[in-house]
Amino acid sequence: MQERRRTPRRRSYIGATIVFNNRCSTIDCLIRDISDDGARLIFSDTVNAPEQFDLMINKMGETRRVRMAWRQADQAGVAFLRHSAADLTMLGHARRLREAEAERTALRDRVAELLGRE
C-alpha cells in the first residue's frame, strides 16, 4: 500500500476528547497515531461525529480544529486544520480575557478581605 501522508505518523497512546455542538457534546477517544498533519482516533464504540470538530488533546493541553478524513467502525482519521490569523487573534483575546477575569476575581477577594479587617 502506498503511503499518501505528507508527514509520517508516530504511534501514540494519548487520551483525547471530541468537542462539538457549541461545546455541548463530547466523545472520548484515544489517539493511536499522530503527525503534524493529522491523527488516527480510536473510539470505544461506533460514533457519529460531525465532519469538523475540536479535538482536545489531554496530555498536550491543547485543542486542535480537525476535519474528518475517513471513518471505519470504531476508528477515524482526522486532518488538523490550519488556524487563520483571525482564529489566532480570537484565541489570544480569549486567553487575555480569562487572565483578566482571574485577576479581577483575585482583586475583588482581596478588597473584600481588606474591608472585612477594618
Image (tube, helix red, strand yellow):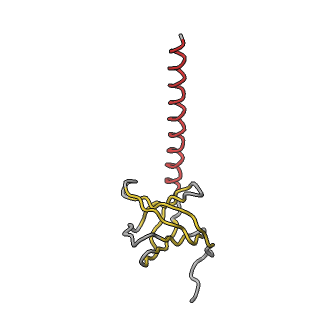
Q: Residue at x 51, y 15 (%)?
A: 115
- Horizontal and vertical percent for residue 90? 49, 49
Q: Which residue sits furthest top? A: 118
Quadrant housing the N terminus: bottom right
Is residue 4 placed above or below 103 in the rendered structure? below
Q: Which residue sits furthest front? A: 44
Q: Which residue sits furthest bottom? A: 1
Q: Residue at x 49, y 74 (%)?
A: 77
Q: Residue at x 50, y 30 (%)?
A: 105
- Horizontal and vertical percent for residue 2? 58, 88
Near-viewer residue (21 or 7): 21
Near-viewer residue (106 or 101): 106
- Horizontal and vertical percent for residue 114? 54, 16
Query: How many badges with numbers are in the image?
Result: 0
Near-viewer residue (44 or 73): 44
- Horizontal and vertical percent for residue 60? 59, 57
Near-viewer residue (87 or 95): 95
Q: Residue at x 51, y 49 (%)?
A: 91
